[in-house]
Amino acid sequence: MIETLLSLTINGVLIGGLYALAALGLTIVLGVMRVINVSHGAFYTLGAYFTFLFSIMLGMNYITSFLLSALIVFAIGVVYERILIKPIRKEELNVLILTFAGAFVIEEIVKFTFGPRYRNIPPYLSGTVDIPGGSVDIQRVLSFAIAIGIVAMLFIILKFTKIGKAMRMVAEDEEVAGTLGINVDRVQMFSFGFGAMLAASAAALLSPIYLLYPSMGWDPLLKAFAIVIFGGMGSIPGTVFTGIIFGVAEVLTGYYISPTWKTVVPFLLLILIISIKPTGLFGEEE
Amino acid sequence: MEKTKVSAGILEKKYAALIAFGIIAAIIPLITPSIYIIHVLILAHIFVIYAASWDILTGYTGQLNLGHAMFFGLSAYVVAITNTMLNLPLLFSTIAGVFSAFLLSLLVGVPCLRLRGPYLAITTFSFSWILFLLASSAMIWLSGGEEGVRGVKTFVVGSVPNYYLSLVLMILSVYLLYRIASSETGLILKAIKEDEDAAMACGIDTTRYKLLAFILSGIFAGIAGAFYAQYMRIVTVDVVTLELSASAITFSLIGGIGTIVGPAIGAYMLTILFEGFSWLADYRILIYNLIIVAFVLFLPGGLISLKEKVNKKRKMVIGNDRK
């Protein structure tokens, strides 16, 4: 009984770490640019399909495909920001509508390029690890470790590098950052690309677990939304913690209540939290 | 003195356009033999109400609602379920449907009163997403999923009577919303959109007015959803999808956000166009969304802003003449 619970929890944590990774990209864009990027899910889809392209269609190894797809999506994100977002960034609603439509455009392009049918990427690593109450795939453990590694890297970048400090400054106060000689436009362009890259990395790590299809990005997008709001906007520890909570809540609901309810629960939790504390669990009061 | 004359002229023009539309709309069924065209126009009427109801909350009051389909969809489902499973008379089902949309607007509105910007947008999104998940999987025993709830009764039988009913309903709803939007209440809503803190500082009870906007928005979308349920006689997951929520925004954007009339025009035109483009089949969604991107970038004020631009140019020409 306890062992089942433990093994479910471990599984939840492993999945949740990857959700957190997907949500981090969104929270960075929100923090630095103050826009909601609805195309975030589409970048996730692109990340998964580029991984598919390189690893299955072109036969490269998994790590190379992962890195290549992250880099390409980074570049796409940068171009996307420069051409589409920058001219209208001040209008919150317009950015929202544009990225919404943009997500559909990307989805359709993916559909025409790769076809509408389901695709799958076989596990890049086989074998299991024994845990109390069962076992988990080594692949999931490794993916989780990579995700945590990326989060740690992100933390270091934000804390110690020049670009990271500039990002934090812009997030704090755009105008002051501008007067201090920070190139705000460039920082925001970089942040947007970075956010897209995080979505793509999460997708690359999750793609051997879930199926690929052109509209696959909406589910992680909504989860990322919920995680970002729940954890408080702009808070990295909050986002990671919430991602893991969501992963565990999902697995537990799927097992103890019913698999069809597991996708509903995170959103119910979100609404509950937001009714009590409008700035999220870890958000600062305004 | 001169000014009032000018505004009266504009007013007359406006009514003239409305009356002309009314007359044309009224005789369409007499001149077209195609039931399909009538069907598309009925859908257009429904979506006009739906888009205008989104506009009162988001366009006027500035409360970003990304999940407008929840009001439409819940009302449609409640009408269908109470009518077919509980065998309630259609009139009561309709009342129940609209009432449920009203309750949902309170349920969503109250927690959302304290939220701003992205928080609000994502919370409304979440509400509609929950409804979608319930209808498409978790509560499939009630909603019927893709199969839907079938066999809803109708108020009037046949396309043409439904056409006139929907026409009247549309004109009434848009008229009411437009009157509210142009009244003092509308002005206060606009003030909240421009600067909520400033409005509050002026002694406006912003919470009350925001909730009012939520309720109005929910009720009119509920009316549209209830009519849809009795006209289509079947309610499926389509009524709570992301696409439907997105289309409220698209219609309004292309028509002109924050004008009530703009979203109405946008919904009317796009519904017809979207059906008209059905020969494009696979490329339809792509083209549709590319158009939206183009509008956001190049004509964010929507079609209705074209009129102002033309007027401005005309004024400039007159000014030059005087020189």
Image (tube, rainbow, N blue to C red):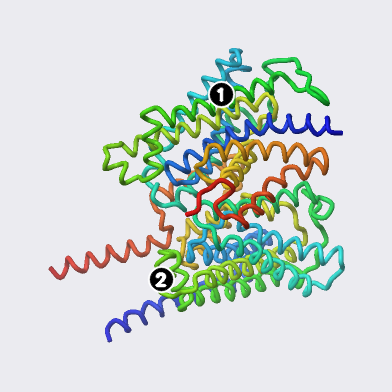
**Quadrant in which the N terminus of chain B appears:** bottom left
Q: Is residue B20 visible?
A: no
Q: The residue tagged with tag 2: helix, strand or loop?
A: helix
Disc 2/disc 1 C-alpha distance (Å): 48 Å
As drawn, is B194 to the left or to the right of B152? left
**Chain label for disc 2:** B
Q: Which residue is mark 1?
A: A149
In this rendering, is residue B84 above or below B246? Answer: below
Q: Is residue B173 visible?
A: yes
Image x and y of residue B301, in percent: 41, 58
In this rendering, is residue B195 above or below A201? Answer: below
Of residues B48 and A120, the one drawn nearer to the viewer in this rendering: A120
Of residues A75 and B31, the one drawn nearer to the viewer in this rendering: A75
Q: Residues within 10 Å of mark 2 (few under 14, many from 20)?
A: few
Q: The residue tagged with tag 1: helix, strand or loop?
A: helix
Quarter of image, res A200: top right
**Chain label for disc 1:** A
In this rendering, is residue A283 above or below B83? Answer: above
Q: Which residue is mark 2?
A: B201
As drawn, is A137 to the left or to the right of B114? right
Of residues A219 and A182, the one drawn nearer to the viewer in this rendering: A182
Q: Residue at x 55, y 32 (%)?
A: A199
Q: Residue at x 59, y 14 (%)?
A: A58
Tag 2: amino acid:
Ala
Q: Residue at x 81, y 38 (%)?
A: A255
Q: State the residue lying farthest toward the bottom.
A: B1
Q: Residues within 10 Å of mark 1 (few under 14, many from 20)?
A: few
Tag 1: amino acid:
Gly
